[in-house]
Amino acid sequence: MAAIETEGLTRLFGDRRAVDGVSMTVPDHSVYGVLGRNGAGKTTTMKMLTGLLRPSSGVARVCGVDVVKDRRGAARKIGALLEAHGFYGHLSGRENLDLTRRLLGLATTEVDRVLDVVDMTRDGGRRVGDYSLGMRQRLGIARALLGSPPVLMLDEPTNGLDPDGIADMRHFLRELPIRAGATVLLSSHLLGEIEQTATHVGVIHQGRLVVEGELARLKAELAPEIGLRVDDPARARAVLRSRDLTLSDDADGLVAQLRPGDNHDQVCAALNRDLVAAGVAVFSIGARAPSLEGVYRAASAVSRRPVSEPV
Ligand SMILES: Nc1ncnc2c1ncn2[C@@H]1O[C@H](COP(=O)(O)OP(=O)(O)OP(=O)(O)O)[C@@H](O)[C@H]1O
């Protein structure tokens, strides 16, 4: 059984379709990354799954439990890190966790267990007010882990962290299914973030799920690409227009998408010959490794932004 399954999940705000007919499948024990621009509908989707928002239509099941018919039952399957943490700064991390533990009626040993999972056993006795943002984020995940929910839902888990904190958190997220024995659903507007942490990806664009699947498989299915750096991209575009290629821009220059079966080396040599013959200086030309950016570009056909920028 899938950890999360939705069919035609839709949420309207007035006549605005924030989430529009999303049918997604999050496999058990995957790290599933929901990728989309700001306002794409990621948070609204997560809120419907956790029972914070009611769907306008459609069905969603968490570990087989329907989120509308049994909102509490479904919510019990999920540990979520959604918004501001709301920790008490004057209490220690351990004391903060203990408050939630008591509310949930769990054994006292739960606090030690979750602190251990997030590698914060040593810092558990310190005041949360003295924690770094990254530590507070980990404490938020520790709280989501209380009671061992089978699904963890993390909305933009690296938001606001510094580069070291981001690297640590990404490493931690990759290990989370093993450490916590859970399925992880995380959202991000950063391609690199999903690429480095997720086993599966779903791209949401304007409320719709435009592509979904195992990341490695989606990459493998991509048409091969050639990256070009030239002195005059506009001229190069004009020269290459005669060839049957899809051209787009990226941070480093131009990207030419080949047809399945095309031979990289031969196409590279031919493009190089054409460009040089037309007086365009070619700084570099070569095959590009299939990337999530390619998957995103192919799926939404809207992103022409550099890979380092948020989608
Ligand atoms: N309570 C609300 N009332 C009206 N419109 C809303 C409400 N919540 C979200 N929206 C709108 O729904 C759309 C989707 O928002 P959502 O927060 O789900 O996007 P997101 O992908 O999570 O973006 P971000 O990364 O910025 O959080 C946006 O256009 C947003 O303005």
Image: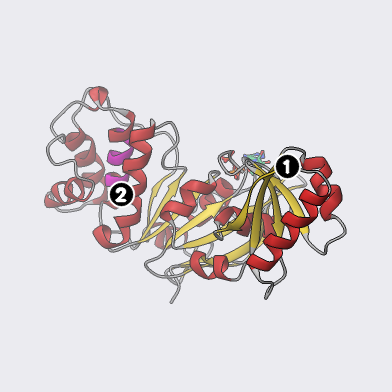
Residue at image point 14% right, 53% down: 107
Name the element at disc 1.
loop
Of labels 2 and 1, earlier in sequence is: 2
Name the residue carrying label 1.
281
Q: Do the residues labelled 2 and 1 touch (CB within 8 Å)?
A: no
Q: How far apart are marks 2 and 1 (CA)?
A: 44 Å
Name the residue carrying label 2.
172
Q: What residue type is labelled 1?
A: Ala
Question: x%, y% of residue 38?
Answer: 62, 40
Reply above or below: 124 against 303.
Answer: above
Question: x%, y% of residue 296?
Answer: 63, 55
How has the structure been colored for display? secondary structure
How would you rate the neighbour count of disc 1 (Cα within 10 Å): few for under 14, some for 14-19, many for 20 or more?
some
The C terminus lies in quadrant: top right
Residue 127 can be seen in this image: yes
The N terminus lies in quadrant: bottom left
Q: Is residue 140 one of those drawn in magenta?
A: yes
Give the residues drawn in magenta, as a range.
136-142
Question: x%, y% of residue 56?
Answer: 66, 56
Q: Which of 67 and 248 is in front in this view?
A: 248
Name the element at disc 2.
helix
Question: x%, y% of residue 134?
Answer: 32, 34
Q: Closer to the camera: disc 2 or disc 1?
A: 1
Q: Nearer the viewer, residue 279 or 265?
A: 279
